[in-house]
Structure formats: structure tokens, C-alpha cells
Image (cartoon, grey):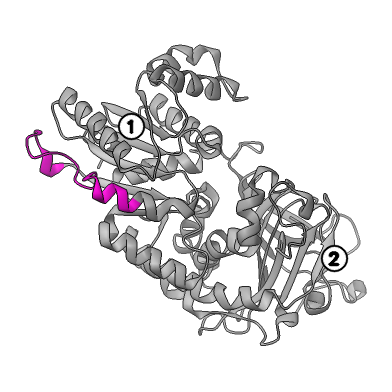
């Protein structure tokens, strides 16, 4: 359905005074509004414990938007009209009475619009609070979109948006899933993995299945290894308490990295439909296995210097802030191909990318002096920064000598090389847009989440038996031993 034709909608944000709303959601909602990509009328209701008025909340939103580096003073009038859509409800998520007050606010909006508005509840809070919010939404009757006396009450939908992590282990994830199932149908649940909403990640499907160039090579016969990296230069900052309870592997591995791995390794879904794509992703995850039975042969973990001194971190914490694991996808297409999954905090660089290394040709038309020189073809999906796709290939260098030079073909979204100049939507814009449209392609299904935890839970157990590598902030840990074969002369040529 075209978003402009969608019925009037209310977005309720639990945790509307928190970091996620300030850093991501406020701007994403505004950009959708400014581009005409929200239903009309549209309302935002912020729900949090702070004692704010409607005007206070609107002033907060204005401050967030105008402080953004991309703020355009010419859009000031749009900000004025946008903030008038925002309302605030002071409330405690444990107090059932505040849900009743929220219900009164929503019912008033329905009456003013003279129609039952769609209700979208965004849980921008710690997953520790999910159970309480779900139960109180149900007890207060807020899982029923409207009273029967409101016009078109039976036509409105009710949806929930939840952030990762979905549980802290396989058992907790299963319990959370059962809880969700008590109150909502699968088509009402939108589990956010914002990496799936990034433009380059979405383009993996098109790149693979809309071109014959690479899909025929997408197997163990032609690919030597794959790297998936999410590297961050920032430390845990104010997230110490939350981060120390989960660590890097659960924070980034269980969701983002495994979702990226599923997109790279899944079979052709056969149709560009949310159901087909989600089933294809979920189907491949159970085949992901550790590359070796011994933890020290497939796991490396690290912690940056000074981590234990961070606010709210256990001073003797053994929580990893960095991991690298070597896995395989034990099916016909991928068996024996190593996949290196890596993520960490306070590293020497900030980038997210997927790198596909193709095998060297069996018969090389190469100069005799080439020796042990490696000349793999390398395909890189660069997710951030400088989003784009790059292919490294080899060509004869200029002149009389027959030497090989590395060359690149690149497609960049930022238009630096003239390939693409359109602004593409932020991941959170896409998350909200697709949720309102009812498109679940970019959201994790129950089957996918449970399969991810089934793999991650024993890996977390193995991880704890491997000594921590302490590394300096601003530097990458030294990875040796189990990963020595990983090094090659051209691994960083991208």
C-alpha cells in the first residue's frame, strides 16, 4: 500500500526521553514527515517518566533536530508543523494506571480524527522492560486498537516494534517469544535489526539474484573465504551497565552479524516477498557451525584497556568488548568455506563491511616473476562509511613489462564517483516506513531469532573458556594462532 493512502496513524514511543529517540528516531520520523512519507493525519506520543508537558516535549524535539549537522534553516517552518504532531504522556511502565491515561489520550485522538487510528508502539527501552510493557499493554486493553463506538474500529491495525537483543540466551529468547505470542500475532511483531535496513545490505539480494555475473560463482568451488566486520572506534560510553551484562558477541553477533551472514549465504527465495525472503534467511541459519570443536581454534576474544573502569562496569569484568570467530555453513553450497565474523569497541577504525574472497584461477596467465604473489578477486559490500560495492580485479600494468596491477570497479551511494547522487533513507527511516506499510522483509522472524540463539548460546559458553586479549583503545587486537591462515597480502585492498 502507498504510505500516503495508509489510514491515520499514532506512533507511541516508550522511552521517548532516552538516547535512541534523541540520536535516531526523532530525525528519522521528521525526515519521513518532510518527504511526505507518513500517513495523514499522523501523531507522536512520547511516553517516559520525566515530568514534561506537551510543549516541553516539542521543544526537546526541536532542539534535537536543529542541533543536527545537516539541519537546514530553510526547513524551520516544517519543523514547526512537525512538532505540533507531538504529544507527551508522563508514565511509569510498571504502573497500570499510566497505561489507562495513555489509553485516554489515544481515544481522544481517535475522536478528533473521527476514525480509529492505527496504533504503532515502539519500545525504545532496555529489553529488560519488554515483559512488563507487553503485559501492561494487554491488561490495560491497549492491544485493542479502538472502542467499538469509534468509526471503522475493525479496520485499524496494532503493531509493536522491538529493538535487539531479543533475549540474552536461547532460553530467555524462547520465553520472550512465547510472551509475544500470548499478546500478538506474528504479523503484528516487528523485531528490529537496523542493519538489515541499510541500503547496501538490502542491495545484496539484488546484487546476487538479479545478476548472472556472480550468483553462478557463489559457492565453495569459487569462494575461498568470507569476512563480516562491524568495527567501532568508540568505547561503551554510558552503556556500561547494559553492555557488561551481554558483551560484544550478544550485542552484535547474535543479530547484526548473523543476519548479514544469512543474507550472504541464503538460497534464492524465489520471490521478492517478505515471507519468502524471511523464510530463506531463517532456513540457512541452522547450518552455521563453529569451524572447529576446540574453542581456541575458532574463537578470539578481547577487552580494551580501561573497560573495567567505565561507569557501571564490574571492576573485575571478563566481558569481551571484541570477538572474532571462525564458522562454517555446513550445507552443500558452502561446506568447507571459512567465515570470519568480527566486531568490537574502541578499535583503530570504524567500518562495517562484508568481504568475499574468490579463489585464484587454477591456471594463471601471470609473469614468471610473480612467485608467491596472491591475486584473488575481492568483492566488498561496504555498509559504512562510504556505502557502496567494490570489485577488485587484476590487469596488466602499463608498459613493456608484463606485470599485474590491482584495479577496482566501484559503485558508491554518496556520488563521489558520479554513480549515485540520490539521498537514500536512513536505516531507522526505512524501519518505520516499512512497519507502517506492513512489510516485514527487513525484520527478523521468530524462526530466524531462535536459530540465531541456538548457534550463539554454546559459542558464548566456549568464549568464556578462551583467555581475554587486552588491547589498547584505538588499536586493533593482534589476531594470531587459529587465524594465521587468514592473513594475506591483499586482504585490506578495498
User: Residue visible at 65% across and 61% down?
Assistant: 247
Residue 191's place in the image compared with 450, above or below, is: above
Which residue is the site of mark 1?
A: 38
Image quadrant where residue 450 sits: bottom left
Near-viewer residue (149 or 354):
149
Q: Residues within 10 Å of mark 2 (few under 14, many from 20)?
A: few
Whether the magenta-drawn stretch holds residue 146 is answered as yes
Q: Quadrant of the N terminus?
A: top left
Specify which label sits upstream in the sequence, 1 or 2.
1
**Which residue is painted at 29% across and 63% down in the image?**
181
Q: Position of residue 292 (x, y in %)?
A: 67, 85
Position in image of residue 210 (x %, y %): 44, 60
Q: Where is residue 208 in the image (x, y as percent from the top left)?
A: 50, 63
**Cα distance, mark 1 to mark 2?**
48 Å
Q: Which mark is residue 478?
A: 2
Look at the image and say whether residue 447 sits in the magenta stretch: no
Q: Which mark is residue 246?
A: none
Residue furthest toward the left?
149
Horizontally, residue 74 falls left or right of residue 273, namely right
Name above or below for residue 310 compared with residue 171.
above
Span of residues in magenta: 134-155
Q: Is residue 14 left or right of residue 478?
A: left
Residue density around tag 1, few if under 14, some if 14–19, many if 20 or more, within 10 Å: many
Residue 262 visible here: yes
Question: Which residue is nearer to you in this view: 139 or 472?
Answer: 139
Q: Is residue 275 left or right of residue 280?
A: left
Marks 1 and 2 in Cβ contact (< 8 Å): no
Give the image location of residue 40, x and y in percent.
Answer: 26, 27
Q: Is mark 2 on a helix, strand or loop?
A: loop
Amino acid at each position: 500500500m502507498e504510505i500516503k493512502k495508509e489510514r491515520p496513524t499514532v506512533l507511541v514511543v516508550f522511552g521517548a526521553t532516552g538516547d535512541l529517540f534523541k540520536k535516531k528516531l526523532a530525525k528519522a520520523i521528521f525526515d519521513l514527515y518532510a518527504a511526505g512519507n507518513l500517513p495523514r493525519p499522523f501523531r507522536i506520543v512520547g511516553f517516559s517518566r520525566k515530568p514534561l508537558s506537551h510543549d516541553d516535549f516539542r521543544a526537546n524535539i526541536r532542539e534535537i533536530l536543529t542541533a543536527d549537522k545537516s539541519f537546514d534553516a530553510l526547513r524551520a517552518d516544517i519543523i514547526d508543523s512537525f512538532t505540533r504532531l507531538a504529544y507527551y504522556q508522563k508514565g511509569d511502565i510498571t504502573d497500570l494506571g499510566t497505561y489507562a491515561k495513555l489509553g485516554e489520550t489515544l481515544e481522544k485522538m481517535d475522536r478528533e480524527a473521527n476514525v480509529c487510528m492505527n496504533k504503532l508502539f515502539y519500545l525504545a527501552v532496555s529489553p529488560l522492560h519488554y515483559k512488563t510493557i507487553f503485559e501492561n499493554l494487554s491488561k490495560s486493553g491497549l492491544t485493542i486498537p479502538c472502542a467499538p463506538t469509534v468509526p471503522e474500529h475493525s479496520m485499524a491495525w496494532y503493531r509493536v516494534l522491538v529493538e535487539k537483543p531479543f533475549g540474552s540466551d536461547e532460553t530467555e529468547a524462547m520465553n520472550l517469544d512465547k510472551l509475544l505470542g500470548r499478546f500478538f500475532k506474528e504479523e503484528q511483531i516487528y523485531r528490529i535489526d537496523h542493519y538489515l535496513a541499510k541500503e547496501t545490505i538490502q542491495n545484496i539480494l539484488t546484487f546476487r539474484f538479479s545478476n548472472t555475473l556472480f550468483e553462478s560463482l557463489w559457492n565453495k568451488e569459487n569462494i575461498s573465504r568470507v569476512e563480516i566486520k562491524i568495527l567501532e572506534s568508540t568505547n561503551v560510553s554510558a552503556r556500561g551497565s547494559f553492555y557488561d551484562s551481554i558483551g560484544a558477541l550478544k550485542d552484535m553477533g547474535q543479530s547484526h552479524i548473523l543476519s548479514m551472514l544469512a543474507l550472504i549465504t541464503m538460497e534464492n527465495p524465489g520471490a521478492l516477498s517478505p515471507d519468502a525472503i524471511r523464510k530463506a534467511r531463517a532456513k540457512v541459519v541452522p547450518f552455521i557451525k563453529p569451524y572447529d570443536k576446540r574453542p581456541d581454534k575458532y574463537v578470539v576474544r578481547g577487552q580494551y584497556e580501561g573497560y573495567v573502569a567505565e561507569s557501571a562496569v564490574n571492576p573485575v569484568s571478563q566481558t569481551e568488548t571484541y570477538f572474532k570467530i571462525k564458522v562454517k555453513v555446513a550445507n552443500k553450497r558452502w561446506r568447507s568455506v571459512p567465515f570470519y565474523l568480527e566486531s568490537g569497541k574502541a578499535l583503530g577504525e570504524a567500518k562495517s563491511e562484508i568481504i568475499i574472497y574468490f579463489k585464484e584461477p587454477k591456471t594463471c596467465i601471470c609473469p614468471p616473476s610473480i612467485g608467491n604473489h596472491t591475486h584473488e578477486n575481492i568483492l566488498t559490500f561496504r555498509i559504512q562509511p562510504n556505502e557502496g560495492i567494490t570489485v577488485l580485479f587484476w590487469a596488466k600494468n602499463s608498459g613493456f613489462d608484463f606485470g599485474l596491477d590491482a584495479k577496482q570497479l566501484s559503485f558508491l551511494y554518496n556520488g563521489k564517483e558520479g554513480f549515485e547522487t540520490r539521498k537514500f533513507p536512513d536505516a531507522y527511516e526505512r524501519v518505520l516506513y516499512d512497519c507502517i506499510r506492513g512489510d516485514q522483509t527487513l525484520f527478523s522472524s521468530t524462526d530466524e531469532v531462535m536459530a540465531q540463539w541456538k548457534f550463539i548460546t554454546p559459542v558464548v559458553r566456549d568464549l568464556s573458556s578462551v583467555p581475554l586479549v587486552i588491547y589498547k583503545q584505538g588499536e586493533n587486537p593482534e589476531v594470531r594462532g587459529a587465524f594465521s591462515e587468514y592473513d594475506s597480502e591483499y586482504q585490506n585492498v578495498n
